[in-house]
Image: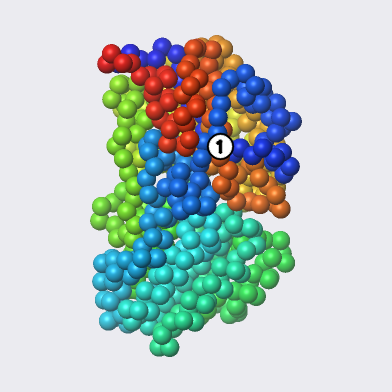
Amino acid sequence: MIHSKKPVGLIILDGFGYRKDLKDNAITPKTMPFFFSLLRKYPWTTLAASGNAVGLPEGIPGNSAVGHFTLGAGKIFEQPLTQFSRMIHDGTFFELPVIKNNFIQLAKTGKTLHIMGLISDGGSHSKVEHTQAVITAAGRYGIKKIVIHAVLDGRDVPQKSAMEFLERIEKTVFELPAQTNAEIGTLQGRLYAMDRNENIERLKQAYRVITQEEPHPIQTWQNALENYYGQGFYDETIPPMQLIKDPTIKNGDGFVFVNIRADRSRELYLLLKHTSNLSFLISGIDYQNDSNSLTICTTPNTTNTLNDYLEKQTIKIFSIAESEKYAHITYFFNGGREKNRPNETRVIIQSDNPTTFVHEPAMKAREITHALVQALDHHDAEFYLVNYANADMVGHSGNLEATKKAVGVLDKQLKRLYETFVIKHQGTLYITGDHGNAEDKKNSNPAHTTSPVYFLVVSEQPINKNILTTMKTLADVKDVIIKNSFYYLGK
């Protein structure tokens, strides 16, 4: 293998999609003049980043987890979301030993089943039908007491859409056998239960409402939504609360955490695992790389990722992101493995912890760029893997003007990287997105989209422009980088 003598960078602009219509689109020549100047000068194309193109059901928006997984793997794998829904529809879910055996045993003890998950149809972490299926299975196997711990979305779906999904949960509860008592026992926004940035105070609040009975006026979820909406809260930010008398976990109870992504489920899951005396703790997937975990879906993994290839060739890797996207350049990009490679340097810039990034559109983009430029000037690596979170995290606010500011910050970072990577060090930049978001803010939409993403090759070195004509999905990026920047036929 002949190593690249020039630096190679894969720049992943999170939530940065392509949409030709500029109306309600944050990504325009006006907001990103430098990026669009690159499009005029260098070869580019668009890549599918949603639905079947990333192993999801057709029509489901892409997300950061599956986008980075597919980019790193260079192959399309069936994702847990698809697997879970398929098993429900063909009936095999209800015969899974992890469900059937544990539910039958819990029914014999008369203990309570607790079900927790993100209640929405966003598809990034769950679908409401998954929670409905667990409720239905509990009824079939004779469990008499069910408590649902509802986590509200407002990020992957409209910001005040919880009523639609909670009504679907209640419809499923209504269809249970008469002797089954099932209730929505707690309610909270995903800001708390699905923290991934080690915000201890939020995690404590999420944990407390499912483990410690609190004196409070009993209220319906309808009243809770009306009250908090009136105070200016939306689904994601509604504080944790108990809706019924004592919905808490007791010794010997069972617990199912429905979510099918690890990064926003791991903190609360591990807290429950280490502090609760449950008869079982089942999760949607393995949240912690533990072969003994009880899981509904199998996690896709591969040992043939882009970084695996580079490691075999002893190419030095420099990976950097802010902590909001830490898992994406590590666990997900590496095919479902957290391992730190001997030839890899990882730099994680600690994200701030605002309720929303609408007032912090720069996030840590400048710090990431500064660290990158320093590493380049010191020749710390040959391949640089970079995630900028701005377009996605600010795009989730649904605020078009804030998202414009966020991508404007990105434009300045790309200019600086171009001057350092391409002009100063004669390297190559591959610039892409992992899914859409910032390009479509119609009706203050906070969610991911089904848009394709840009793929742009920026280099003063000769490249085979024909390679772009055969690219169709994110899975094609791996081989293009290898063949265009690292591959040597004589190896």
From this viewpoint, which residue is outermost toward the bottom? 178
Residue at image position (59%, 16%) is: 419
> Is 63 positioned to the left or the right of 157 in the image?
left
Q: Which residue is mark 1?
A: 453
Point out residue 135 in the picture as x, y percentages from the top left corner. Answer: 42, 73
Picture quadrant of residue 227: bottom right
Q: Is residue 131 above or below residue 396?
A: below
> Is 297 positioned to the left or the right of 399 in the image?
left
User: Which scheme is used to colour this image of the protein?
Assistant: rainbow
Q: Nearer the viewer, residue 479 or 233?
A: 479
Point out residue 50 in the picture as x, y percentages from the top left corner. Answer: 50, 46
Query: Amino acid type of disc 1?
Result: Val
Point out residue 62 in the picture as x, y percentages from the top left corner. Answer: 51, 46
Q: Is residue 448 visible?
A: yes
Residue at image position (34%, 68%) is: 91
Q: Nearer the viewer, residue 467 or 406?
A: 467
Q: Is residue 437 above or below residue 414?
A: below
Residue at image position (53%, 23%) is: 457
Q: Nearer the viewer, residue 146 or 89?
A: 89
Residue at image position (63%, 74%) is: 222
Q: Is residue 248 above or below residue 308?
A: below
Residue density around tag 1, few if under 14, some if 14–19, many if 20 or more, within 10 Å:
many
